[in-house]
């Protein structure tokens, strides 16, 4: 619990409810309460009273709870909003949550339930503060930005698992920030002073992956002119992050299982058993349960790597975070380019918030950087947005994908982007939000070859 009182602003067009709420909270020193009887009054009060939490009735004249929520999101994105509603308006409350409200509570208020919600918000504020201001002493998520409820819960889990040595499996679509989560776990662990070794399993060919992971002896294969340590030896004492774990071949899965069970392995071409103390964090954008059914992934290995399971939501599932992410990437891109851009216009932001972001946060970061490069004005305007995010730009493509299998859809997406980028692999990989090695692996998988 924070040492300073949590500042609450209660908004209801019924003055009697405001007085009742104030009296109910007056003996609780954990909270400082102000009230407003309209959305407009609440907006004015927030200029002088920096609330931590706004509790607002949903149905009010002139400015209702949804409009107040929208105004708070635009002007005070750090404030948590709780929607108060009757049973007959619960569907509108769910709409408010999709628009960025933290949660909703049914009226008449159950004070015990409300206090539990407020305690949860205070805890999430502490987690968020640690993620933004962490000095590395206990926890750091400075590159992850998000205030959506699902992200706050994820940050909380990351903070807890960081204190352990448990093996972690991070699931999520490409571009959602799985590597940042893995790095945060490492930086929050007792191993933070030791190496954090990143391995993109999809970028390693079947013939070289064992040597890359476990090292090799001199003469083990053509070109092995000297003994070389692998990634696991390099990460000894620290953490190894195996990205795209679902792409490793079966024979490598057997060796990986041995490391997880016994903490030892042998270099390729060697007989010496080498012991390592390395924490393993894995990530995948695949459905590993389906891969197990298809005999592409070992069931025993799955349960070994899935001791702690974390799921990073796609950006389309946390759209209220888009303005925060845009501001974060805008500031970073301006720093990099030396430009001074004040912000993004409301019209441009509305378009960015409506786009489905198939490439997730990585795609958003690339789009913001591109806008900054070409913007010559004080603000980002709709004219600075790339064609791919403009309304209707994705319609033709999505119609083509309708009723296709996931693999067919991915193949079509890869082919389309390669053609748009004139088969420049690096540019295509950046547009897709994946590494060049991952793009090459997908081209091999789908038999995609440059036509000239």
Image (cartoon, rainbow, N blue to C red):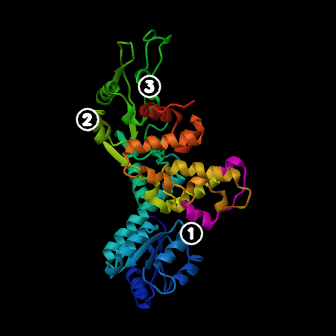
The answer to whether 292 is drawn above or below residue 156 in the figure is above
Main SS class of the magenta portion in the image: helix
Q: What residue is disc 1 on?
A: 74
**Labelled pair 3, 2 in contact (Cβ < 8 Å):** no
Query: What's the magenta region?
Result: 332-352
| 270 shown above or below 441 | above
Q: Secondary structure at mark 3?
A: loop
Pointer 3: what residue?
A: 205
- At horizontal 60% and vertical 58% (from top left) the residue drawn is 327
Left or right: 341, with 101 as reference point: right
The label number, if any, that marks residue 299 in the structure image: 2
Q: Secondary structure at mark 1?
A: helix
Q: At 34% across and 40% down in the image, what residue appears?
A: 166
286 sits to left or right of 143: left
- Whichever of labels 3 and 1 marks the residue nearer the N terminus, that label is 1
Task: Classify mark 2: helix, strand or loop.
Answer: helix
Residue 334 among those drawn in magenta: yes
| Mark sitting earlier along the chain (3/2) | 3
At 64% across and 54% down in the image, what residue appears?
A: 331
């Amino acid at each position: 619990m924070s040492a300073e009182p949590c500042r609450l602003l209660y908004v209801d067009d019924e003055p009697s409810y405001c007085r009742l709420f104030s009296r109910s909270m007056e003996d609780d020193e954990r909270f400082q309460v102000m009230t407003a009887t309209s959305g407009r009054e609440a907006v004015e009060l927030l200029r002088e009273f920096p609330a931590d939490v706004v509790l607002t009735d949903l149905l009010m004249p002139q400015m209702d709870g949804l409009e107040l929520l929208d105004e708070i999101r635009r002007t005070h994105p750090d404030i948590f909003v709780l929607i108060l509603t009757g049973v007959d308006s619960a569907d509108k409350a769910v709409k408010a949550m999709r628009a960025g409200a933290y949660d909703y509570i049914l009226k008449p208020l159950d004070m015990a339930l409300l206090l539990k919600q407020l305690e949860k918000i205070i805890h999430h504020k502490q987690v968020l503060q640690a993620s933004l201001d962490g000095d590395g002493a206990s926890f750091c998520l400075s590159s992850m930005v998000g205030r959506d409820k699902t992200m706050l819960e994820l940050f909380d889990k990351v903070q807890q698992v960081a204190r352990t040595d448990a093996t972690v499996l991070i699931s999520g679509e490409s571009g959602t920030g799985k590597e940042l989560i893995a790095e945060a776990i490492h930086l929050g662990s007792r191993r933070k002073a030791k190496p954090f070794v990143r391995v993109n399993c999809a970028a390693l060919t079947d013939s070289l992956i064992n040597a890359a992971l476990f090292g090799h002896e001199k003469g083990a294969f053509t070109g092995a002119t000297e003994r070389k340590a692998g990634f696991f030896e390099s990460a000894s004492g620290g953490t190894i992050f195996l990205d795209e774990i679902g792409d490793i071949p079966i024979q490598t899965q057997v060796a990986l299982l041995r490391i997880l069970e016994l903490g030892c392995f042998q270099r390729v071409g060697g007989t010496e058993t080498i012991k390592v103390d390395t924490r393993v964090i894995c990530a995948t954008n695949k459905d590993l349960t389906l891969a197990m059914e298809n005999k592409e992934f070992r069931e025993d290995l799955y349960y070994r790597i899935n001791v702690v399971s974390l799921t990073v939501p796609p950006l389309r599932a946390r759209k209220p975070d888009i303005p925060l992410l845009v501001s974060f990437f805008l500031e970073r891109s301006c720093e990099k380019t030396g430009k001074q851009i004040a912000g993004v216009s409301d019209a441009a932001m509305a378009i960015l918030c409506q786009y489905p972001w198939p490439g997730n946060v990585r795609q958003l970061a690339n789009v913001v950087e591109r806008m900054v490069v070409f913007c010559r004005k004080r603000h980002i305007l709709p004219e600075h947005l790339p064609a791919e995010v403009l309304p209707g730009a994705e319609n033709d493509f999505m119609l083509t994908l309708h009723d296709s299998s996931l693999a067919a859809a991915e193949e079509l997406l890869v082919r389309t982007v390669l053609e748009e980028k004139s088969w420049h692999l690096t540019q295509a990989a950046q547009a897709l939000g994946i590494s060049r090695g991952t793009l090459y692996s997908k081209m091999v998988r789908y038999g995609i070859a440059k036509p000239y």
